[in-house]
Amino acid sequence: MAAKAVHPIETLREHATALEAAMTVALAKPRKTAVHDVRTLVRRLEAQMELLTQLAALPADSAEASELGRELRKLRRAAGRVRDLDVQRKTLKTYTGLPKRAATELRGELKEAREQRAKKLQRVLLKQLPRVVGALEQVVESLGTANGLVLPALRLAPLVERWTLSQESATPLAGLDDDQLHSRRKVAKAARYMMETAAGAASAEQAAARYEQEQNAGGHWHDWMDLEATAREYFGRKHPLTLAAGKHCKRSRAEYVKLLER
């Protein structure tokens, strides 16, 4: 059965509670899953705040939302740096199309870098946990009478689609640079998370699946781009590992653009 309604502020509270728990887990031991959970929940909270802005429940110039946004960005960036190293180390271990000896060597170097980044993330978590919790409480309090906001599920998909279109560049897909393509992926990710608040509504679930496909294709390309940059920094531009990563980066970028064209 289709969902009858979406409760945006209730969802915001649920994400906030889940993020606080994930931060506590990652602070104790920043394993891969814990770091991933923190980063994903930050993105979900950011998407939910954008949805509330589109619904006019949260003013675009809200001081409380701006403060929360700043605290979440600090947390997301710190978690993202650890996550990127986790992805690169996994690719170096499992992908057979890379020079094996060089991949093993670089993976060992990234292990040490990951440990350092994880320690830094723990310091950020220790500092940000009370700040994020406090900022979230301020945002919820500022919503006031909007706390009872209910949105018919059928209205969600067109609302998010309009927002997505407003974020897209007027430049033809073939002419988008890497930064513009990366921004397109981030928009798709936010749109997916907004759509998923209407679990059970067919139109929203179909749209969420489409945005997730776009997000994954863009993420695959961006992960290869990051690995190419890391290999270039460590081995140099013309090393076989750098060239191999660059080849996969170019291929996955083309596949991503083709997906967007479809």
Image (cartoon, rainbow, N blue to C red):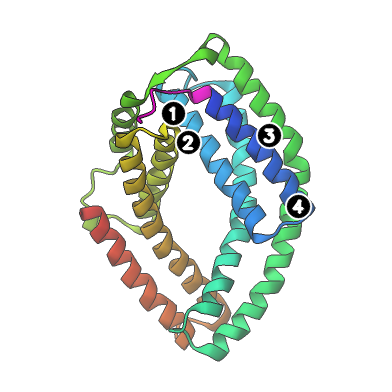
Is residue 141 visible in the rendered structure shown here? yes
Is residue 166 visible in the rendered structure shown here? no
Q: CA distance from mark 3 to mark 4?
A: 14 Å
Query: Which residue in the rendered view is the most extreme toward the front?
Result: 1
Residue segment shown in magenta: 1-9
Label 1 near label 2: C-beta < 8 Å? yes
Instruction: Say the numbered circle drawn on residue 132.
Output: 3
Precedes in sequence: disc 2 or disc 3: 2
Q: Which residue is mark 2?
A: 47
Q: Identify which amino acid the numbered label 1 is placed on.
A: Leu
Q: CA distance from mark 1 to mark 3?
A: 19 Å
Q: Which residue is mark 1?
A: 51
Q: Identify which amino acid the numbered label 4 is placed on.
A: Gln
Residue count near mark 2 (Cα–Cα under 10 Å), binned few <14, some 14–19, many ≥20 = many
The C terminus - image quarter: bottom left
Q: Which residue is mark 4?
A: 122
